[in-house]
Amino acid sequence: GLFSMLPYLPKMIALVAFFYIIAGAILLYFSKFNIYSPWEMGITFGTGHLLSYSILYQDIKKIRSNS
């Protein structure tokens, strides 16, 4: 979803999209060892959401300071 919204969001959101791709690949790699933990998903999505929030918040602050 983030890759499809890149034209409408700040360019730094691409880092979050790549984070999700890399984290997903790592989680898929470790799933072949039958290591299933809800903490893995929680930490992954929590980190991604915090990154998204910080990027969007900084962009809003920049827009408000320019007006």
Image (cartoon, rainbow, N blue to C red):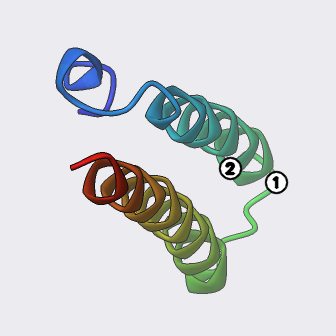
Q: Quadrant of residue 61?
A: bottom left
The residue labelled by disc 2 is 27
On the image, the x and y values in percent for residue 38 come to 56, 83
Q: Position of residue 35 (x, y in %)?
A: 75, 68
Q: Is residue 17 above or below residue 48?
A: above
Seen from the viewer's position, the closer of residues 43 and 50 is 50
Q: Pick whichever, 17 or 40, lies toward us.
A: 17
The numbered mark at residue 8 is none
Q: Residues within 10 Å of mark 1 (few under 14, many from 20)?
A: few
**Picture residue at 69% right of the left edge, 52% below the top:** 31
Q: Is residue 66 above or below residue 38?
A: above
At a point 49% along the width and 53% down the height, the residue shown is 55
Residue 10 percent coordinates (x, y): 37, 32
Instruction: Name the quadrant containing residue 51.
Output: bottom right
Q: Secondary structure at mark 2?
A: helix
60 sits left or right of 24 in the view: left
Residue under numbered circle 1: 33
Which residue is nearer to you in this view: 22 or 15?
A: 15
